[in-house]
Amino acid sequence: MKQKLWTWLVRAGLLEDDTTEWSAQKRSVQTRTQRFIAMGISLGIAIILWMLVNLNNTYTTELEITMRVTEFPENEVLVSDWPAVVTAEVTAEGWQLVSMATNRPEVVVALDDAPPDLNIQALVSNELSSFPGLSTQRVTPQGISLMYEPKVTKKVPIRPAIQLRYEQQHGPFGPWTVQPESVRVTGGLRIVEALESWPTVNLSLDDVRRTVTRAIPLEAATNGLVLDVDAVQFEQPVKQFTEGELTLPIDILGAPLGKEYTLDPSSVTVRFLVPVDQYQEVMQRRPVRAILSYDDLEADQTGFVQPEIQKTSELYVIDWLGVTPVQVAYYDVITP
């Protein structure tokens, strides 16, 4: 009767059959998990105890100390290389060194009353003396000579450092512009007076087919210089171009009355690129001409001259591709 009751409880799920293979595997997994947990807890306790013991020991190491300057002399600029970070060799207990490494100490120096030869080691040692049990062995650099120049301001043009590579049959439509066009630079006399322009950061764009409008940061100021703007608005109009061709008669300019020349041929064909939206107007108005100067004809000794191609209107953007023929022959017409 007892055996039947136990079998019924197992089948009903109210008891677990310890004799099955699955139950044995389950107990094995639980045992391994418990062992890993125990090992992890033991290892964590051991690490904590090791740290408590060792961090109470005294060590010598190097720390980085931040050097921050304030209160600059009026109308003067520091031109010496200021060490933003110095290295100090210190001796202290481990727990204190760990705290200082994560929270770097800072030394603040007021330059308006600082001596010309500044003792960096003394400043750092004085700052670190507030930490109990800590001693400073040496500081690198140990000192710095403070040199100043008169502070001046100069306005210089901005030079965009931008390279545009255009998609096929596309190109610039007129010159680029930047706003503002110039920047005021304030700093030491010698450095500022030598400046002729101030560049933007480098920017390179490929496959350009639309007008480029970008805010471009200026190159960061160094050597104690200060800029009144930090970015400019750059714009380069871009259009799609198409090829055009015109045959132009050659005009001789400056010939005296009664003096004539015969040209062979008397016209040239010019090939050019023009914006698509200006093509029809250019072909109708023909805002170009081919000319020869009478003085050039008189000075020539070869019998061949090269016509000059000129635009007669600045309303159109035309990029010359070639002229055919490049040179023409000429003959002096003698009137009997």
Image (cartoon, helix red, strand yellow):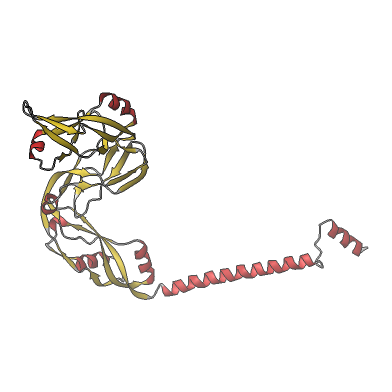
Residue at 23 percent of width and 68 percent of height: 125
Q: In the rendered image of this protein, does residue 272 appear above or below residue 165?
A: above
**As rendered, which of 17 and 336 lies closer to the eye?**
336
Q: In the rendered image of this protein, does residue 249 appear above or below residue 109?
A: above
Residue 297 left/right relative to 215: left
- Choose top left, top right, bottom left or bottom right for residue 36: bottom right
Residue at 22 percent of width and 51 percent of height: 221
Horizontal and vertical percent for residue 202?
29, 49
Residue at 48 percent of width and 72 percent of height: 49
- Choose top left, top right, bottom left or bottom right for residue 109: bottom left
Residue at 79 percent of width and 67 percent of height: 21
Q: In the rendered image of this protein, does residue 242 appear above or below residue 27?
A: above
Q: Quadrant of the C terminus?
A: top left
Please state the total of marks drawn on the protein image.
0
Horizontal and vertical percent for residue 261?
12, 31
| Residue, far front | 336
**As rendered, which of 132 and 216 lies closer to the eye?**
216
Horizontal and vertical percent for residue 137?
26, 74
| Residue, far right | 1
Q: Could you tell me if residue 131 is visible in this image?
A: no
Q: Quadrant of the N terminus?
A: bottom right
**As rendered, which of 305 and 141 lies closer to the eye?**
305
